[in-house]
Image (cartoon, grey):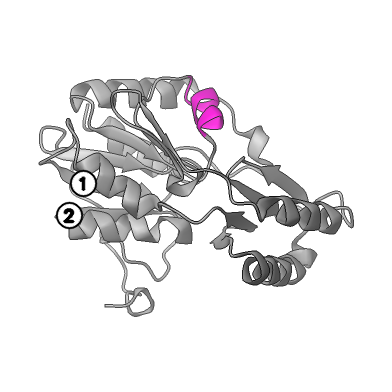
C-alpha cells in the first residue's frame, strides 16, 4: 500500500514492552523539538535520563537513527547512546562502538559552493555541512523554499548526489545506506536480533525506517501532526513521545 493511501487517523501505540522490543528513534521532531537552527538543539537532562534508562532496561536494544552527524548526536545526547545511525544512515556506530562509514561523494564540493552562493541572498538561509552531505535550511527564509528545492534538484541531477527532502530543508547526500538499511543492519546484530522493532520518527526522512520496521515484524510510530504515512501508530508530538517512552520504565 502506498504512503499516499494511508491517510486514516492512526491510534496511539500500545504500552511499550521493553522485554521484546528494539527501539529506533529519530532525534529532531521526535526526541527534541524542531529548532530554527540545527545548532540550537541542546542537551536536555530529562531526555538524556530517559534514553540512558531505556537502553539499560532494553538490554542495549536502542539506537538513534537521524540525519544529524554523529558528533552532533553525541553532543545533544551527551554521549549516552552507543548505537547510532547518523547522516541518514551513511555513518553507523554499531553496538560495539565500531564505525561503519561511506567515503564522501566528489560532487559535494560543487553542491557546497552552489548552496553557499544561494544562501548569500538571505541571512535566514543556512548551509549545514555534514561531511557526507550538505543541507540548505530555509525555515527562517520560507520565501526561498521553491528556489532552494529547484536548486537542489538541479545539483542532484548534475552530480549524482542523492536528494533528501526534509522539513524546511533540502539535503544532498552521498549515495549509500539509508535509515532503512541501518535498521536492518542493527536488527541483524546482537542485542537487536530477534526483537520486535519500533521506529519513532516525524517526517518524510523517516518513512523508510517505518517500512523497515514493518517488514521486520514491528511498526512505525509517527510523531507529530497526522499526515499520509507508512506508520501504524501516532503520537501527538515530542512530549507525547517522551511520555510514552518513560511509561515503559
Look at the numbered discs 1 and 2 and tell me whether their residues touch, using CB distance below 8 Å.
Answer: yes
Q: Quadrant of residue 96?
A: top left
The image quadrant where one finds the C terminus is: top left
**Relative to 105, is 8 on the left or the right?**
left
Q: Is residue 151 above or below residue 123?
A: below
- The residue shown at (38%, 20%) is 49
Q: Which residue is mark 2?
A: 216
The kind of secondary structure element at disc 2 is loop
**Relative to 50, is 59 on the left or the right?**
left
> Is residue 50 a member of the stretch shown in magenta?
no
Q: Main secondary structure of the magenta part?
A: helix
- The residue shown at (42%, 46%) is 89
Q: Which residue is mark 1?
A: 197
The kind of secondary structure element at disc 1 is strand
Magenta residues (range): 70-78
* Mark 1 or mark 2, whichever is nearer to me: 2
Crowd around label 1: few <14 · some 14–19 · many ≥20 (10 Å): many
Q: Nearer the viewer, residue 241 or 146?
A: 146
- The residue shown at (46%, 45%) is 90
First in sequence: mark 1 vs mark 2: 1
Amino acid at each position: 500500500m502506498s504512503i499516499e493511501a494511508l491517510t486514516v487517523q492512526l491510534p496511539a501505540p500500545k504500552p511499550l514492552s521493553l522485554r521484546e522490543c528494539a527501539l529506533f528513534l529519530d532525534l529532531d521532531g521526535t526526541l527534541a523539538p524542531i529548532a530554527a537552527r540545527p545548532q540550537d538543539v541542546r542537551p536536555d537532562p530529562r531526555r538524556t535520563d530517559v534514553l540512558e534508562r531505556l537502553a539499560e532496561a532494553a538490554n542495549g536494544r536502542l539506537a538513534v537513527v537521524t540525519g544529524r552527524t554523529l558528533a552532533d548526536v553525541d553532543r545533544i545526547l551527551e554521549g549516552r547512546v552507543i548505537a547510532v545511525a547518523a547522516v541518514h544512515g551513511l555513518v553507523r556506530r554499531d553496538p560495539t562502538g565500531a564505525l561503519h562509514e561511506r567515503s564522501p561523494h566528489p560532487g559535494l564540493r560543487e553542491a557546497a559552493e552552489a548552496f553557499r552562493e544561494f544562501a548569500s541572498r538571505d541571512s535566514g538561509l543556512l548551509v549545514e555541512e555534514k561531511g557526507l552531505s550538505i543541507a540548505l535550511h530555509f525555515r527562517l527564509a520560507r520565501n526561498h523554499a521553491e528556489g532552494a528545492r529547484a536548486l537542489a534538484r538541479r545539483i542532484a541531477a548534475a552530480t549524482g548526489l542523492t536528494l533528501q527532502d526534509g522539513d524546511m530543508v533540502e539535503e544532498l547526500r552521498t549515495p549509500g545506506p539509508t535509515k532503512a538499511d541501518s535498521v536492518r543492519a542493527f536488527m541483524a546484530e546482537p542485542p537487536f536480533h530477534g526483537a520486535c522493532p519500533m521506529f519513532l520518527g516525524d517526517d518524510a526522512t523517516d518513512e523508510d525506517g517505518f517500512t523497515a520496521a514493518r517488514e521486520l515484524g514491528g511498526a512505525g510510530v509517527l510523531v507529530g501532526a497526522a499526515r499520509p504515512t507508512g506508520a501504524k501508530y501516532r503520537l501527538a508530538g515530542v512530549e507525547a513521545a517522551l511520555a510514552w517512552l518513560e511509561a515503559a520504565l
